[in-house]
Structures are given as structure tokens and as C-alpha cells.
Image (tube, rainbow, N blue to C red):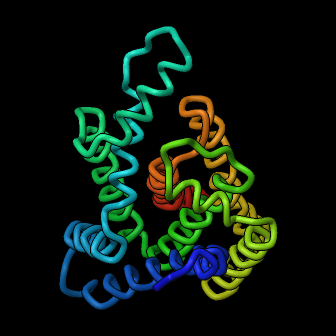
Amino acid sequence: NITEEDFKKSLKFFPLVGVFEGFISSLLILTLIKIFPAEVLALLNLILLYLIRGIFHLDGLADTFDALNVKSTEDKAKDIEKRLSVMKDSTTGVAGVWVIAVNLLCKYIFIKKIIEINMFLPALVLTYTSSRWSTLLASFKAKTTKTSSLGTLIIKNNSFKEFLFSVFLVIFVYLLIGFLFFKINFLIAIFLLGNLFLTSFITLTLRLYFQRKFSGITGDNLGAIIEIIEIVLLFYWGYLWQKL
């Protein structure tokens, strides 16, 4: 059985889960790239990704948007209670279905583009590494809600030591990918830093927004942040890399 202490020790290695996801996804593409077109590879890539990780983050994205879609009563405390109640509901509303559809469509289009420009391995590894790390950035010293057991568990155990280790781990992954796949120059360095900046800026912005809307961070919010970060970074790699 996994204890809370085991969970705490594993938190700092969250970015390595992203490295694994990115590597396995890239391996699938490398294996089949001479057989199938980019459209099929992008679809298979998405299927593989959610077979590996499950749909927990998608569920968190849907629950978060369903909760944000709650009509305001003009009473802040009541609005927060209603949002948290909707988020706990096991059914998925219209907003949740819509955001899942948009999320999957965007990922499909952006992954297809990344495959077409032959930039899939560094793009997928750094995207998934960054999205996993965003969980630690969003939860570090964050407020918890009364209803979130997973969010509370992550926030409670994400100490300064664990978070700092994760920062150095992410920097190491970025440096490793940078030196393995690119001839580093000023523009490449700026592009990679931009990837990290976008991750940090969007994560902290969403954290601030969610804390205002829910009076804290929930596990569903963390799942939503992961999915949103991935959409942005896949777009970044797919459509801005060629501008260098």
C-alpha cells in the first residue's frame, strides 16, 4: 500500500512522468511514421496518451468548466459553494462536454502539425514534462478547499524541498533535450525559455483565478491546468517553431 509519506516522496518526480509520456508517444510515431500519415499518427498518439494516463485530467477539466459555468447569485460565498457542489457532481454538463471536445480537437491538430514538421520528440517530451510540473507549481503554498481530498493531499505534501527539487529536475530535462536535439544558439535558447515561461505564467494565472472562483485549489483544477498547459505548448511548438 502507498502511504502518504511515499506519495510525498514521489511528488518531486512528477516531471519524469511527463518525460515517460513524451518518450513513449514519440516512440509510437517513430515506429509507424513510414506506414501511416500524420493524421492517423496524431489520432493514435492521443489514444495512447490517455491509455497511459487515464482520463482523470480530462474529467478535471470538464468538472472545472462545468463549475465555472454556474450562474452567479451575486453572493460570493454561495457562488463558491455552488461551484464546488457542481464540481463534485459525477455527471458532466454541456460546458464539460464542450471543453473536452475542444481540448481533444486542438491537441489532434497541434500534434499533427508537430509530426509534419518533424519536431515531435522534443515537443512532446517538454510539453508533457512541463504540464506535469505545472501541478507542483500550481499547488505550492496554495490554498485548499473543503471538498478536495486529492488537491489537499498534493498541496499538503508539496513542501519547499520537493518543489525545489522538481524545479532543478525540469531545468535538467530542458538542458538535456536542448543539447541532444538542437544546435543551441540565442534564438533556440529564447524559444526553450519561452516554453518554460508560458508554463509558469499560465499556471500561476490559472491558480490565481481558480483560487478566486473556488476559494482554493482542487484536484480537478490541477487536472484542468495540465490539459490547458498542454494545448498551449503544443500550439507553441507546432506553429511558432517554424518562425525561428
Work out whether residue 182 or residue 207 is closer to the camera in this orientation and state it: 207
Height in image: 41 above or below 199?
A: below
Can residue 239 be seen in the rendering of this structure?
no
Q: Which residue: 52% across, 47% down?
A: 218
Residue 4: where, in percent of width, then height?
59, 74
Q: Quadrant of the C terminus?
A: bottom right
Residue 196: where, in percent of width, then height?
68, 60
Side (left or right) of 83 relative to 194? left
Q: Which residue: 55% across, 66% down?
A: 132
Q: Which residue: 39% across, 58% down?
A: 57
Height in image: 146 above or below 57?
A: above
Side (left or right) of 103 relative to 14? left
Q: How many marks?
A: 0
Residue 75: where, in percent of width, then height?
52, 11
Side (left or right) of 187 relative to 21? right
Height in image: 230 above or below 124?
A: above
Q: Which residue lies most toward the top here?
A: 74
Can residue 135 be seen in the rendering of this structure?
yes
Q: Which residue: 43% across, 30% down?
A: 83
Residue 108 occupies quadrant: bottom left
Work out whether residue 213 or residue 237 is closer to the camera in this orientation and state it: 213
Residue 147: where, in percent of width, then height?
48, 44
